[in-house]
Image (cartoon, helix red, strand yellow):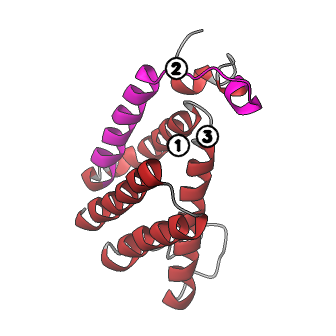
């Protein structure tokens, strides 16, 4: 849990820095890789098996780089979706809800508690985040009724 919180703090710090001062893509990428490395190396979050491959457990030489690439990729995907109001929150809530549903039979509180907490926080931010109106296609798409169900708001 400590590694997860440290990585979250790194992402938060880089996000605040980017919002206040602006930063280039290389520095943002470095922050993402740093946060992922904290989780992988200190939190021991490593994809060790891939269900569709019958080869069994992956060796660490393959598993660690695969996990880093996957987590940085997911972080970038959510970051890109964040350009549309409410879309990143909706994607996050739906993805984590699936994790809770699939993980519930294990009764693993280290999985379920943080996941449910993030669902609650993301749902709350979706409900209170106003959409911006503007002339670009992104803001027009964000204010359309198609993006609103992602944050459970009615038009």
- Camera-nearest label, 3 or 2: 3
Residue position marked by numbered label 1 in the rendering: 95
Residue position marked by numbered label 3 in the rendering: 83
The image quadrant where one finds the C terminus is top right
Quick one: 16 or 105, which is closer to the camera? 16
Q: Residue at x 34, y 52 (%)?
A: 106
Q: Residue at x 66, y 67 (%)?
A: 52
- Percent across and percent down for residue 102 are 47, 46
Vertical side of 132 occupied by 80: above or below? below
Q: Residue at x 61, y 53 (%)?
A: 77
- Percent across and percent down for residue 33 are 49, 72
Stretch in magenta: 111-140
Vertical side of 75 occupied by 37: above or below? below
Q: Label 2 to label 1, Cα distance in Å?
A: 15 Å
Is residue 88 shown to the viewer in this render?
Answer: yes
Instruction: Report if the CB atoms under discs 3 and 1 are less than 8 Å apart.
Output: no
Give the structural element (helix, strand or loop) at label 1: helix
Give the structural element (helix, strand or loop) at label 3: loop
Quadrant in the rendering for residue 137: top right
Between discs 3 and 2, the one toward the N terminus: 3
Residue 40 falls left or right of residue 86 = left
Instruction: Report if the CB atoms under discs 2 and 1 are less than 8 Å apart.
Output: no
- Percent across and percent down for residue 110 are 27, 55
Answer few, some or many: residues within 10 Å of disc 1's Cα (few below 14, many 20 plus, some between 14 and 19).
Answer: few
Residue lying farthest to the top in this orientation: 155
Residue lying farthest to the right in this orientation: 137
Quick one: 17 or 39, which is closer to the camera? 17
Quadrant in the rendering for residue 70: bottom right
Residue position marked by numbered label 2 in the rendering: 152
């Amino acid at each position: 849990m400590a590694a997860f919180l440290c990585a979250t703090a790194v992402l938060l710090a880089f996000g605040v820095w980017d919002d206040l001062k602006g930063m280039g893509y290389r520095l943002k990428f470095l922050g993402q890789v740093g946060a992922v490395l904290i989780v992988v190396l200190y939190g021991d979050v490593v994809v060790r098996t891939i269900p569709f491959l019958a080869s069994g457990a992956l060796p660490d030489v393959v598993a660690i780089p695969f996990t880093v690439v996957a987590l940085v990729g997911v972080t970038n995907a959510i970051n890109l979706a964040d350009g549309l109001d409410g879309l990143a929150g909706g994607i996050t809530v739906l993805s984590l809800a699936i994790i809770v549903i699939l993980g519930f039979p294990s009764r693993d509180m280290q999985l379920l508690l943080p996941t449910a907490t993030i669902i609650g926080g993301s749902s709350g931010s979706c409900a209170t985040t106003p959409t911006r109106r503007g002339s670009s296609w992104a803001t027009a798409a964000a204010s359309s009724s198609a993006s609103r169900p992602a944050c459970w708001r009615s038009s």
